């Protein structure tokens, strides 16, 4: 029967592997990313591409950031021509942020580059093992979501 010490040792080992993996992701992102878009900008662009136009406050809630930080990051994306501001049809005083066609193309290109990179990293893994990894990651993510459901909800941010 498993004892608490063994489980905690295993959890510690897993935590170390998480940190190692996150460091590697950060380094990889810096190497394979279009340098017009920082990591935070990529997350915002992904949200706009995947979820459609939204107000700054909704975007900040979705990515669990504060409105002022998102506003600064969005300004960079707007200057780069990747995001545009349009009038909100529901409230003419507000604006919606939307990915431009150039932003969508860049996002798709970056996603494909990341996908090809991961494929290269795993090229020596049999497809069955790769599918197993996807299943395990899905189970892990679901366990985190179920253990602490509020982390999956947008954080209410102040204006």
Image (spheres, helix red, strand yellow):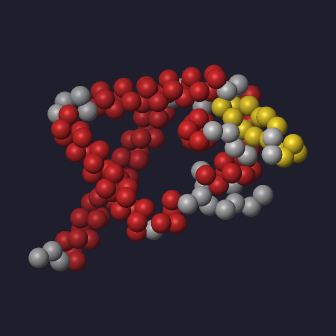
Quadrant occupied by the C terminus: bottom right
Task: From this view, report whether residue 8 is shown above or below residue 23.
Answer: below
Q: Is residue 32 left or right of residue 78?
A: left
Residue farthest along the right direction in this orientation: 93
Q: Is residue 86 left or right of residue 132?
A: right
**Residue 11 point in image, percent of width and height:** 28, 65
Q: Is residue 122 left or right of residue 69?
A: left
**Residue 102 point in image, percent of width and height:** 63, 22
- Taking the spot 47% from the left edge, 30% from the top edge, the residue there is 111
Residue 15, picture quadrant: bottom left
**Residue 119 point in image, percent of width and height:** 31, 29
Task: From this view, report whether residue 100 is shown above or below residue 68.
Answer: above
- Taking the spot 36% from the left edge, 26% from the top edge, the residue there is 116
Q: What count of labels does the image hold?
A: 0
- Taking the spot 18% from the left edge, 38% from the top edge, the residue there is 128
Q: Is residue 158 left or right of residue 102?
A: right
Residue 38, picture quadrant: top right
- Taking the spot 67% from the left edge, 62% from the top edge, the residue there is 156
Can the viewer see residue 77 in this picture? no
**Residue 13 point in image, percent of width and height:** 27, 60
Q: Nearer the viewer, residue 30 or 129?
A: 129
Q: Nearer the viewer, residue 150 or 51?
A: 51
Residue farthest along the left direction in this orientation: 1
Quadrant occupied by the N terminus: bottom left
Q: Nearer the viewer, residue 77 or 22?
A: 77
Can the viewer see residue 130 in this picture? yes
């Amino acid at each position: 029967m498993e004892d608490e010490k063994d489980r905690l040792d295993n959890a510690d080992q897993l935590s170390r592997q998480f940190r190692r993996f996150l460091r590697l992701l950060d380094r990889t992102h810096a190497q394979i990313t279009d340098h017009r878009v920082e990591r935070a900008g990529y997350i915002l662009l992904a949200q706009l591409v995947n979820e459609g136009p939204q107000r700054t406050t909704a975007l900040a809630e979705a990515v669990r950031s504060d409105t002022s930080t998102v506003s600064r990051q969005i300004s960079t994306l707007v200057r780069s021509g990747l995001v545009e501001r349009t009038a909100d049809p529901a409230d003419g005083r507000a604006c919606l942020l939307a990915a431009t066609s150039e932003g969508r193309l860049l996002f798709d290109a970056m996603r494909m580059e990341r996908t090809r990179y991961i494929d290269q990293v795993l090229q020596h893994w049999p497809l069955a093992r790769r599918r197993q990894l996807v299943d395990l990651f899905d189970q892990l993510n679901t366990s985190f979501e179920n253990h602490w459901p509020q982390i999956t909800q947008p954080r209410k941010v102040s204006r």
